[in-house]
Image (cartoon, rainbow, N blue to C red):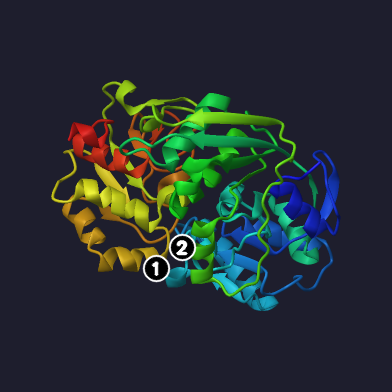
Amino acid sequence: MGMTITEKILARHAGMETVSPGEIIEVAVDCAFAHDVTATLAIDSFRKTGAHNIFDDEKVLLVADHFVPNKDIKSAQQVKTMRNFAREQGVKYYFEGGEAGIGHVILPEKGFVVPGQVIIGADSHTCTYGALGAFSTGVGSTDLGAVMATGEIWLKVPSSIRFEYHGTLGPWVQGKDLILYTIGRIGVDGALYNAMEFAGPVIRALPMYQRFTMTNMAIEAGAKNGIIEPDEITLAYVRERSLQEFTVEVSDPDAHYEKVITIEVDEIQPQVAVPHSPANVCPVADVGHVEIDQVFIGSCTNGWLEDLRNAASILRGRSTARGVRLIVIPASPWIYKQAIREGLIEIFLNAGAVIGPPCCGPCLGGHMGILAEGERAVSTTNRNFVGRMGHPQSEVYLTNPVVAAATALLGKIGGPDEL
């Protein structure tokens, strides 16, 4: 019996010939990641192990990305703790201030992630890196503290579900719509502790930024990881950014899957996840008349340069509807600079947007766009739980960036076809 790509990566890092779903193994970690919110607890756990030094000063990466610039005393203390630890341990890759952005974008962008790796992060959306053919998953800060000390982690090998996408994408339909549609079909626990393997001709045609969006949201279906087999698009992205050697793994033809789910994309329209679940989805045309107070374009899900280009193509020469706050946050300094060079930032400003520094911003209800009681927001982020972006009585609707941009202009949820 063959193995899936996920099983092959885990077997190699465990020093084993084969592994099977449900098996408990101990694997070597290629990269350990934490940000300003989770690093403090991870550092406490690291110290409790009795270790004096991290396992590798080039394989522990720390990024201040959630509450930056510091929004209050507590967030300032969190960053100070992480900064001091990085200095003490000689962490080579510590990012703060003008060097920092959203960790899940910074790591691939700077070439830290390559195919075939095992990446463990103290953040649930660490599964993003599976777009590059790596096994990546989020853990609690206690687990990450142990990883920083030992360079290893024990895992239960997940069973895999293969999602095959066939057909032709319609106008304005992107990876965000595919993953929302998929989550709507299987539910928020439809892939509980499974590896979601995205495959098929539609996936192979997707650009990298849309693949990142899909693997990023695997956790919203309860998955352990999301993953896509590397192809020429993947390798071109990696080789442009990294000099690391890497091993490309692909699933065997006779690999065992818990399920194989085939999705025909021809009839899929731009999707909207309405409150209060990423699985509560419908086509944008079926949402009805829903007026909006705020639109947020950004996050680790849709803050990539191409996402900003897509949004700007809708907003160019237009102004946001009266009473709508439009917030745009590039996901990294490089994306921000490139958006300036291409005139995207000017388009956003002319449309009436507020531009934020590269960070997570309002995604988690932290700062830079908190919702008040009764307010509604359209967001290109990954979660729309109760109170996710502010007041418990506020509402969050998830969309792709072109729908978000169109909504900002219309003042109500709608797609570009309505402009």
Query: What amino acid type should be assigned to the residue bearing mark 1?
Result: Trp
Query: What amino acid type should be assigned to the residue bearing mark 2?
Result: Gly
The residue at the point 30 percent across, 63 percent down is 339
- Residue ID for mark 1: 334
Label 2 with label 1: CB-CB less than 8 Å: yes
Q: Residues within 10 Å of mark 1 (few under 14, many from 20)?
A: some
Q: Position of residue 254 (x, y in %)?
A: 74, 40
Can residue 8 be seen? yes
- List the single residue furthest toward the front: 253
Can residue 390 be seen? no
Q: Position of residue 98 (x, y in %)?
A: 42, 71
Left or right relative to 166: residue 314: left
Q: Earlier in the sequence, mark 2 or mark 1?
A: 2
Q: How far apart in space, not on screen, are marks 2 and 1 (Cα)?
A: 9 Å
The residue at the point 64 percent across, 32 percent down is 191
Image mark count: 2
Judge whether 222 appears above or below 45 on screen.
above
Q: Position of residue 146 (x, y in %)?
A: 78, 59
Residue 101's label in the rendered image is 2
Q: Position of residue 311 (x, y in %)?
A: 28, 48
Judge whether 283 appears above or below 32 on screen.
above
Q: Residues within 10 Å of mark 2 (few under 14, many from 20)?
A: many
